[in-house]
Image (spheres, grey):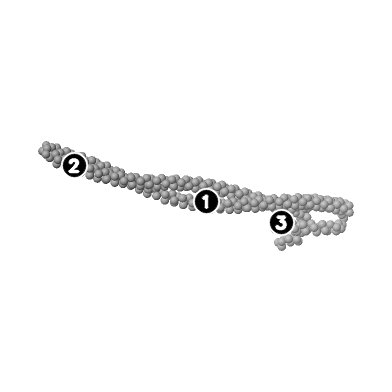
Amino acid sequence: MARSGVQYEDVQRAVDVLMARDESPSVQKVREVLGTGSFTTISDHLREWRTRREENRDVPPPRGMPGALQELAEGLWQKAQESANESLIHYRVEADRRVEEAEARIAEARRQAEDAEQRESALAAHLATTGQRLEERNTALARAESQREQLDEAARRLETRHAELEGLLERIRSEIAQQASEHQQAVENLEARQRERLAREEQRHESAEARLMGLLDEARQERLAGEKAAAEREKQAGARLERLEQQLMEARGQLAEEEKRQRETDWARRQAETLADTRQHEQALLQARIDEQKRMLEEQTHRLRDLEQQLHHCLWQTPATHGREEKEREEENTENDEGPAAAEPSETT
């Protein structure tokens, strides 16, 4: 619908001015004469002016114009009108075809965009699930790491206890060796004293042989008692040593068990770390696929915009082409109209 800025009468006056200049009226020339107005409004008024001129073509020609020339002009106008209608139909069919193709491409682009959005949603859901699993694996890895630290602490305590038991065993062995040495020294001292006493008694008197024998027996008894006491102490020390060795073996068994548990914990930790690296790699691959889908979606969006621009260009290009052809036909008709007008004075003469 024409806007109220430029009226039909303004366009008609501008057309009259152009006709007085022997110029064919067009949207651009009318706007140059008016100095204002939009091309759409001027085009609408100019189309109305041409329609009215078409309706008034049956009006009797001016005086002095020959009937044959009038019929020739009407025939040329009819042919030009039919040619314009055929061209317009052709352009309309072509424009409709381009519009249908553009709409088909737009529908396909929209379908691809919807598919991309669905794939992106599925990938996002899978990524969320993978992230949750990775978080669970990280939690399990943290628990395994805490257990490993506890086992390391227990192993250190066992090693400390083992070292203490080793030191205690070494001290007990040293004490047993020292006691054995002292016992041997006491026996040797006792025998030496007995030999000295026996020698002195033998030298002093032979009558003291019975007493010497008694003393010898007493010395033997004392020696036997000392050996028995030393044996008892050695037996006690051996039993104590066996108990300590048993404790040492138990401590070594516990240490081996703890080392086995630590190896299992290290293996589980390495497995968890491997799994975490795998999850991180999968997450990187998923992120790359999501980025690729986003890039494809952006490309499809650009293609959709280009198609819309092409559609807009096709829709607006056809009327402009039609306007140029109408301008050419009007110029041709104007030249035909000017020919009889120029010939009329000579015929009157």
Identify the disc placed on residue 134: 1
Q: Residue at x 77, y 57 (%)?
A: 47
Identify the disc placed on residue 305: none
Q: Nearer the viewer, mark 1 or mark 3?
A: 1
- Disc 3: which residue: 39
Cβ atoms under marks 1 and 3 closer than 8 Å: no
Mark closest to the chain's N terminus, 2 or 3:
3
Point out residue 175 in the picture as x, y percentages from the top left corner.
Answer: 27, 44
Q: CA distance from mark 1 to mark 2?
A: 89 Å
Q: Which SS class for mark 3?
A: helix
Q: CA distance from mark 1 to mark 3?
A: 65 Å
Mark closest to the chain's N terminus, 1 or 2:
1
Question: Quick one: 81 or 129, which is closer to the camera?
Answer: 129
Question: Quick one: 160 or 74, which is closer to the camera?
Answer: 160
Whether 73 is drawn above or below 210: the answer is: below
Which amino acid type corresponds to the residue marked 3 in the rendered image? Phe
Identify the disc placed on residue 217: 2
Number of marks in picture: 3
Q: Find the residue positioned furthest to the bottom.
A: 4
Which amino acid type corresponds to the residue marked 2 in the rendered image? Asp
Q: Nearer the viewer, mark 2 or mark 3?
A: 2
Residue 320 located left or right of residue 119: right
Point out residue 210 in the picture as x, y percentages from the top left corner.
Answer: 14, 40
